[in-house]
């Protein structure tokens, strides 16, 4: 019995050695393939199509298993355990800037959430401004006005050709050097102050914020119905209703009612200069928008806007000249041509590459770590990784998070693209 | 038909899985030092250092590394390979350092790393000793009127490095004093210095030796001062991977040899002449008595080479820390016989 076990062990050792050299995989696949082919003497087309695919999947899986087992063995040898239990442990480090309540007594899981929200915040701000600037610059490049067109062209050529990390450093350190200390902060009517330590703005203090929120939602629903009614009137009876004006006034009117009659009120807490020592000042109260966020959002949107501008220009140029001439011939003015004829067609060209730029911007926001903006890379893949030493777990979570973010943006943009696509009638 | 194919695939997959798992039984720790063998084969010691911290590990304009951390690497190279210059330095950020060590990219980490329980026990590392006793302190502008940590008030902003124990100590300290503060953590020390220098934060906190070293990088070093208080214990020392006891011993005793040499007054210039000293402890240090090197597979002159090529701890400290003006006073980093806490087990 013992002998048998021993020989079995040697055999398995030899096999293990061969696995290391990769031979056994090849051998196994060929045997498998031949076995399957022989067994079914392939007449069935479905099976014939399936087998190569199945074998490929199998090969891929075994490669993954091979590396995973290796990693496990190596980690075991070095006394490193694997697990996600650390997410519930106390993080015990603080974060500069958080949108949810957080301090060091919260868990690593919470710190992850703080980092994720900060990443989403800077990406959202970046995408918002990049889109606006991109559209403006893109249209400007096609302007008949020589100065405007040239300024837009220079902007694009300069900002898309300098590495983003340098631009981030530039905006951060240039801004830090250029901004005044708190005691000499740039004063906006005593309610807001721009200083080296951040941009201090008044804090909104709401009572019955929920009612206000509901009133805004109600306003939007009302606007939706107003617009569909206006479209119906126009299409059926050719009546032009002033839908925009009515919509705007609804948006003001309904929340106004909430303020006047439903007990919603809003007060402001203004930042006040506070002395910490003879020469050290800061602002107390209000909300501080940290310079790291400003610099990062600025750099990301300035950089990405150049690419979006080029997409917009390509989109507009991609609309046939005949379209514009036809629109002009039926008496539309320049703005109407752009809005009603050119843009709807240009959007189809603009959206797919712009989706890429949104994805790039989101991923580029991970450069935040360089200037201490507490995004997911700095907080989670940085500090948390260091404190716990769980490199594999944390890096996988971080990668998965970026993947999820990117895929969400993609899904949304694809939906928007479909909406804008030509609808055959 | 399809079903039976699926079964086949499943069986094939399961057998693969079994074979792959069988491999796990193979690798068990052996007595020999794989790291030592690999180092000898490669001809250099793979050493992880900082990205530039004057006094500890700093590269000059032509790329030559120096500092007391670097001297630990050099001592290991002298002991193992016979030449202190046979070191390959890998500059690492605080974040990368442990992964680089556990993954085998480096074999010794000498990068002003604080010895803590969780690092020692949890993440596959072993600390072999302490080559610098440090503590965390604060730097402020001289004109700020802040003369002690008791002058800190709510709302103060503090810059530091991310991924270090300083982030944790800072929180403990401000919490214990009940002061609300704004922590700003950068990935690299150079950015911390720049941000603090520009006025983004009111104080800069890290190990005191680090503060002293970074102060020299400020646009006007005389405008800044380090507060007297020390808020934490930071025993800095070299680290090796867990699981290679022989290699661990080599690094530990390379460092100990430097300290012991200072204790017995053996230095780089007199070491070889002390071969026929009266004192057996000195004779053991210079390899004239005993067979100490054999214990970890080295010849008997290993310690002599360390002292001759690298020098003793006192020489190393004077050259890199004292003479450069970083910390002229040795403080706790003095021998136990002279009022410090440097005390190493006897080499015998």
Image (cartoon, coloured by chain):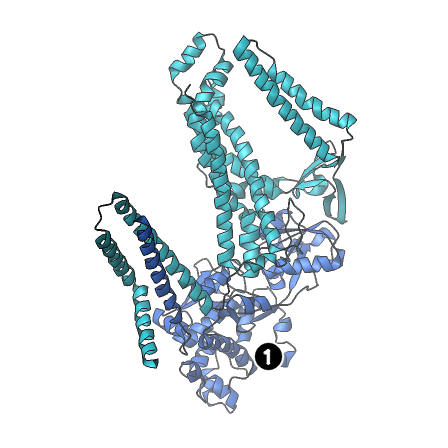
Q: Secondary structure at mark 1?
A: loop
Relative horizontal placement of residue A257, taking residue B257 as reference (left or right): right
Q: How busy is the neighbourhood of tag 1: few (under 14 within 10 Å), some, or many (20 plus)?
A: some
Spot occupied by residue A392 in the image (x, y as percentages of width and height): 48, 58
Relative horizontal placement of residue A106, taking residue B255 as reference (left or right): right
Q: In this view of the protein, can residue A188 be seen by the observer? A: no
Spot occupied by residue B70 in the image (x, y as percentages of width and height): 49, 67
Q: Colour of chain B?
A: blue
Q: Residue at x 27, y 59 (%)?
A: A26
Looking at the rendering, which quadrant does residue A266 occupy? top right
Between B272 and A234, the one lying in front of the other is A234
Is B215 drawn above or below residue A214 in the view shown? below
Mark 1 lies on residue: B343
Q: Residue at x 29, y 60 (%)?
A: A25
Between A31 and A317, the one lying in front of the other is A31
Looking at the rendering, which quadrant does residue B7 occupy? bottom left
Spot occupied by residue B239 in the image (x, y as percentages of width and height): 51, 69
Is A313 drawn above or below residue B123 in the view shown? above
Is B229 drawn above or below residue B265 in the view shown? above
Between B223 and B157, the one lying in front of the other is B157
Spot occupied by residue A111 in the image (x, y as percentages of width and height): 61, 52
Looking at the rendered structure, the number of numbered marks drawn on it comes to 1
Q: In this view of the protein, can residue A249 be seen by the observer? A: yes
Is A15 drawn above or below residue A98 in the view shown? below
Q: Residue at x 63, y 81 (%)?
A: B337
Q: Colour of chain A?
A: cyan
Pinpoint the chain carrying mark 1. B
């Amino acid at each position: 019995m013992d002998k048998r076990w021993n020989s079995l062990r040697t055999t398995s050792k030899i096999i293990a050695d061969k696995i290391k050299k990769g031979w056994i995989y090849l051998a196994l696949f060929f045997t498998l393939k031949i076995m399957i082919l022989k067994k079914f003497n392939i007449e069935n087309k479905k099976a014939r199509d399936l087998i190569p695919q199945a074998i490929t999947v199998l090969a891929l899986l075994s490669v993954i298993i091979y590396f995973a087992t290796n990693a496990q063995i190596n980690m075991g040898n070095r006394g490193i355990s694997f697990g996600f239990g650390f997410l519930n442990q106390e993080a015990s480090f603080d974060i500069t800037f958080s949108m949810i309540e957080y301090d060091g007594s919260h868990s690593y899981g919470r710190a992850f959430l703080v980092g994720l929200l900060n990443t989403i915040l800077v990406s959202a701000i970046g995408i918002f401004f990049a889109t606006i600037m991109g559209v403006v610059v893109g249209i400007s490049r096609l302007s008949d006005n020589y100065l405007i067109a040239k300024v837009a062209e220079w902007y694009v050529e300069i900002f898309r050709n300098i590495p983003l990390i340098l631009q981030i450093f530039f905006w951060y350190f240039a801004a830090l050097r250029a901004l005044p200390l708190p005691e000499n902060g740039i004063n906006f009517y005593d309610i807001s102050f721009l200083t080296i330590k951040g941009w201090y703005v008044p804090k909104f203090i709401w009572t019955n914020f929920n009612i206000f929120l509901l009133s805004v939602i109600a306003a939007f629903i009302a606007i939706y119905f107003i617009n569909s009614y206006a479209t119906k009137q126009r299409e059926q009876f050719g009546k032009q209703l002033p839908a925009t004006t009515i919509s705007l006034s609804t948006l003001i009117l309904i929340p106004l009612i909430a303020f006047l009659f439903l007990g919603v009120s809003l007060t402001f807490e203004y930042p006040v200069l506070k002395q910490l020592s003879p020469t050290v000042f800061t602002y107390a109260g209000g909300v501080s928008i940290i310079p790291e966020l400003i610099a990062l959002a600025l750099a990301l949107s300035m950089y990405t806007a150049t690419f979006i501008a080029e997409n917009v220009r390509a989109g507009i140029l991609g609309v046939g000249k005949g379209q514009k001439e036809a629109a002009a011939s039926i008496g539309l003015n320049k703005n109407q041509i752009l809005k009603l004829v050119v843009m709807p067609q240009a959007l189809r060209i603009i959206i797919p590459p712009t989706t890429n730029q949104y994805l790039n911007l989101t991923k580029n926001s991970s450069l935040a770590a360089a200037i201490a903006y507490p995004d997911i890379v700095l907080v989670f893949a940085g500090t948390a990784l260091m404190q716990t030493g769980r490199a594999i777990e944390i890096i996988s979570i971080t990668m998965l998070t970026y993947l999820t973010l990117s895929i969400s943006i993609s899904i949304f943009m694809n939906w928007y693209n479909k909406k804008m696509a030509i609808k055959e009638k | 038909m399809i079903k039976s194919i699926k079964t086949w695939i499943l069986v094939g997959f399961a057998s693969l899985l079994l074979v792959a798992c069988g491999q796990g039984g193979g690798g068990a720790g052996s007595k020999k030092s794989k790291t030592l063998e690999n180092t000898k084969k490669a001809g250099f010691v793979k050493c992880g250092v900082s990205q530039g911290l004057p006094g500890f590990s700093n590269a000059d304009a032509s790329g030559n590394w120096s500092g007391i951390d670097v001297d630990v690497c050099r001592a290991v190279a002298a002991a193992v390979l016979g030449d202190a210059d046979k070191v390959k330095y890998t500059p690492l950020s605080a974040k990368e350092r442990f992964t680089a060590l556990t993954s085998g990219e480096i074999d010794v980490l000498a990068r002003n790393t604080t010895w803590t329980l969780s690092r020692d026990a949890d993440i596959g590392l072993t600390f072999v000793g302490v080559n610098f006793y440090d503590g965390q302190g604060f730097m402020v502008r001289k004109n700020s009127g802040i003369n002690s940590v008791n002058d800190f008030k709510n709302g103060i902003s503090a810059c530091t490095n991310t991924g270090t124990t300083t982030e944790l100590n800072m929180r403990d300290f401000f919490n214990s004093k009940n002061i609300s503060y704004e922590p700003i953590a950068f990935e690299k020390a150079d950015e911390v210095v720049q941000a603090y220098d520009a006025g983004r934060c009111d104080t800069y906190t890290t190990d005191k030796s680090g503060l002293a070293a970074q102060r020299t990088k400020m646009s006007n070093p005389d405008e800044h001062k380090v507060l007297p208080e020390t808020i934490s214990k930071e025993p800095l020392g070299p680290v090796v991977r867990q699981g290679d006891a022989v290699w661990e011993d080599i690094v530990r005793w390379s460092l100990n040899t430097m300290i012991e040499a200072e204790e017995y007054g053996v230095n780089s210039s007199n070491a070889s002449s002390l071969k026929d000293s009266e004192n057996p402890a000195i004779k053991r240090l210079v390899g004239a008595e005993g067979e100490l090197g054999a214990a970890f597979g080295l010849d008997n002159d290993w310690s002599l080479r360390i002292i001759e090529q690298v020098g003793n701890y006192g020489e190393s400290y004077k050259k890199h820390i004292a003479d450069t003006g970083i910390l002229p006073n040795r403080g706790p980093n003095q021998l136990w016989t002279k009022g410090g806490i440097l005390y190493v087990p006897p080499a015998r």
